[in-house]
Amino acid sequence: MKQNKIKEGCVKLIWNEYYECMDREKMREVQSQKLYDTVDRVYHNVPFYRKKMQSMGLEPGDIKGIDDIVKLPFTTKQDLRDNYPFGLFAVPRSEVVRIHASSGTTGKPTVVGYSRRDIGTFSEVVARSLYSSGASRDDIIQIAYGYGLFTGGLGLHYGAEKIGATVIPISGGNTQKQLQLMQDFNSSVIACTPSYALYLSEAIEEAGIAPESLNLKVGIFGAEPWTEEMRHQIEKSLHIKAFDIYGLSEIIGPGVANECDHQCGLHIWEDHFYPEIIDPDTLGTVEKGNIGELVFTTISKEALPLLRYRTRDLTKLNDSKCQCGRTAVRMEKCTGRSDDMLIIRGVNVFPSQVESVLLEIGETKPHYLLIIHREGALDTLEIWVEVDDYYFSDEIGKLEGLTKKIKNAVESMLGISVKIKLVEPKTIQRSEGKAKRIIDNRKLK
Ligand code: DLL
């Protein structure tokens, strides 16, 4: 079934042309059959879903095709927590060959399980993602996502082995070692969070290593939102092409979707994960092409099949054929979540908006922190931004000038007043995994 073939006029490879380039009508047939099987499986094997469907007067036979998906109940992160740890599994424990978990901000982690076939699916979708980023068996892939309960490290690992690349399973952190191996082993692909990629680029500069002396060509970055401006910054400082990989543990891990060479959205591997876009308030489907909350139904998972899982990620879909030849629907780069959106004095604020302003100004380091305080009844937003030492050694006018420039730009973007504090390099704590960009002191009161 795998037809790894070079597309005409394009040197990029497609891992699974049969599914990635399938006629859209045919894809709907595939999805309909798989949805039917999934609903039947969860109804008979997961009491949670059976009860939910019964309370809605639904039986598996009511789902006759993919269009009937809107009749099905939603699943939320809270449902996984309520059934902690294995309550939503649809297979006996003896068929679960791996567990991953993601730690939340509150309480117990979200636990996910995989059957042997699910691990095969996981490797398959990561293989497709790697190929669409231009990686192949000719590459040496340095995997600097965390290994362990987090899905990033092992997820990328199995996919990279599947395409026959040479894997360096270094995991996250240990920055000096990352640089050493990158040089000594000639890594051509780096996979990590975009914030860690920036951190690595800083470390490379500090070590006096010329980025062009490295063999790096491609970066595969995800697990957190990042902007186009951040992409340019990473590409410039590491001399690579940076690709966006999206995924979440509940659905499988990394490799739910990935950019291709044309970078006009992330192709969703939709023969496995059926996407919908809903209005997070009304829960109704939004009109085609409009932004809303991304919802996924896993249509081939065995151990933890989920119906209409609410990701909280905001994006929109585009099902027009891509220039790369793939027909797989594309989701726009996710830059915000419906739940990490801050509401400050009634205004919706996404950290990514601040980031894009900073990177556009270009005179700061790409490290920032949003601190929200409550003074009486009033919420205030303070933004710390790192700048070069030079601003502190030079006359005060420069520091003040830049502070004012950032303040004006951020205020006109957000429409609320903010306090800007420029801080020295390395003041803001670095992250080896996902960056922490918000301190909300309001919650502590
Ligand atoms: O972060 C899986 C992953 C690992 C994806 C490595 C990509 C690379 P979780 O820890 O469950 O899984 O977090 C999932 O992270 O709902 C998004 O909010 C966010 N996220 C993941 N990838 C992206 C991305 C992994 N490319 C949550 N852009 C998701 C924006 C992303 N946000």
Image: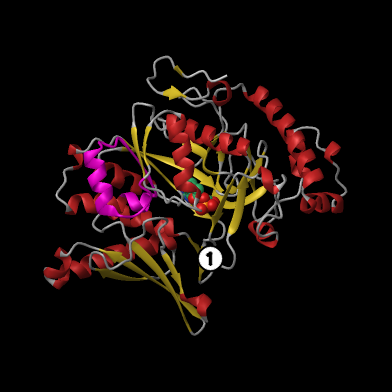
Nearest the viewer among 251 and 118 is 118
What quarter of the picture does the N terminus occupy? Answer: top right
Identify the residue at image location x=53%, y=24%.
16
In this orientation, which residue lies closer to the viewer: 438 or 219?
219
**Visible residue check, residue 337:** yes
Which residue sits furthest bottom? Answer: 376
Query: Label 1 is placed on what type of residue?
Result: Thr
Magenta residues (range): 170-197
Where in the figure is residue 42, as x and y percent of width and height?
76, 44
Q: What residue is drawn where x is 30% and y is 55%? A: 174
Vertical comparison of 93 with 219: above or below = below
Say whether residue 367 is magenta: no
Vertical order, 208 against 321 (above or below) = below
Q: How many marks?
A: 1
- Element type at marker 1? loop
Q: Residue furthest right?
A: 57
Residue 72 falls left or right of residue 427: right
**Residue 183 colored in magenta in the image:** yes
Q: Position of residue 305 (x, y in %)?
A: 68, 44
Name the residue beneath numbered marker 1. 105
Q: Residue 168, located in which quarter of the rendered image?
A: top left
